[in-house]
Amino acid sequence: MGDVAVGARSGQGGEEHRGGSAGPGAPGAGHAAFSGSDERAVEDGGVNEDGTRTGGQEPDGTDKDRPKKQQRSFWKELPILIGIALVLALLIKTFLVQAFSIPSDSMQNTLQQGDRVLVDKLTPWFGSEPERGEVVVFHDPDNWLAGEPTPDPNAFQKVLSWIGLMPSAEEKDLIKRVIGVGGDTIECKGTGPLKVNGKALNEPYVYPGNTPCSQDDQGGQFKVKVPEGHIWVMGDHRQNSRDSRYNTADENQGFVPVDKVVGRAVVIAWPVNRWTNLPVPDTFDQPGLNTQTQNAAALTAAPPAVALAGAGAVPFVLWRRRRS
């Protein structure tokens, strides 16, 4: 009998599940039964009485009932992009690189009138000073440009000047080659060669047909010693350049204070067919060109540099020993 009773109860239970209904007191009364996929739908959102889903998430994980954010119009973003570009250009002009236009023939044939050069303004921020042979841009030390015509730019050119894409008409700047730095003795006799600290310079950059030194009583013949913190500059077109030689009557005696230097011209950027860099000529690398004073200064500065290098080497040595 025990076996028959168990079988009867089992049959009744099976009929209840197959019929899909339950008595009023059953736990599932008043609720719909769902398959596995329907259960997932309940988890994702909800199900109405008619079986339709409510709420939940889209396949990409977003709430389908939440309104989608509209993308900002390109024309609304354009002023912001232009503003960012202008700020970046202004920062680059102030701290990194600035474009300058060559207004005269004083640096031929290295630079031609109308060339655009890019000037490195970053290295002076780290204490670097001009060196012999470099082509540098500097502010007018003491009215060197007196009598020179001043350009009258239009509004568009003023905007380009402000952001650094064109040189400013108000800033009176010059571009020349550094011949001597603080402590150097520079001498010109007859037509040359030009001598620095007693060493004759071979100057292939001098304009063809010009002589390194000019035979005139206006400043072409000279012997000077450059004071510290100053430089002596000359144009490559020696017979067509009003440079340090012809400004010895000013308050700096023709020398240019280092703090007047804007930066070094490193490349010709325009026109395209004249793209090239502006390296220091080899003539300034010849041995014995440095003065005894500069050599002594280098020796004086050597111990701190060696000490700094040694201090930096200590952690490396300890690290190697630890690994061993």
Image: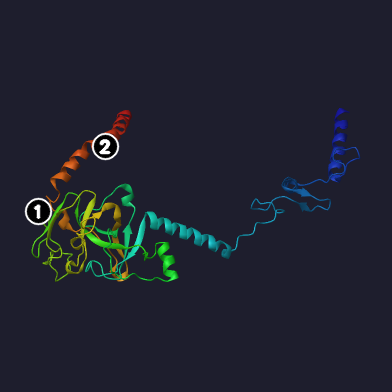
Answer with left or right where residue 299 lies relative to residue 13.
left
Marker disc for residue 52: none
**Label 2: which secondary element:** helix
Relative horizontal placement of residue 125, taking residue 14 as reference (left or right): left
The residue carrying pointer 1 sits among few (fewer than 14), some (14 to 19) or many (20 or more) residues within 10 Å by Cα, namely some
- The quarter holding residue 4 reads top right
Q: Position of residue 172 (x, y in %)?
A: 32, 63
The residue that disc 2 covers is: 309
Residue type, label 2: Ala
Give the x, y percent position of residue 209.
Answer: 14, 71
Q: How many marks?
A: 2
Q: CA distance from mark 2 to mark 1?
A: 35 Å
Which quadrant of the view contains residue 261?
bottom left
At horizontal 16% and vertical 41% (from top left) the residue drawn is 296
Q: Which of the image's four quarters has the C terminus?
A: top left
Q: Is residue 276 above or below residue 42?
A: below
Q: Are marks 2 and 1 in contact (CB under 8 Å)?
A: no
Colour setting: rainbow
Q: Nearer the viewer, residue 84 or 170?
A: 170
Residue of label 1: 198
Badge 1 marks a residue whose secondary structure is loop
Return the disc, 2 or 1, that comes first in the chain's sequence. 1
- Identity of the residue drawn at 45% across and 70% down: 155
Residue for point 53% across, 60% down: 80
Residue 137 occupies which quadrant of the picture? bottom left
Q: Where's the N terminus, which quadrant?
A: top right
Give coordinates of residue 214: x percent, y percent: 13, 66
Amino acid type, callout 1: Gly
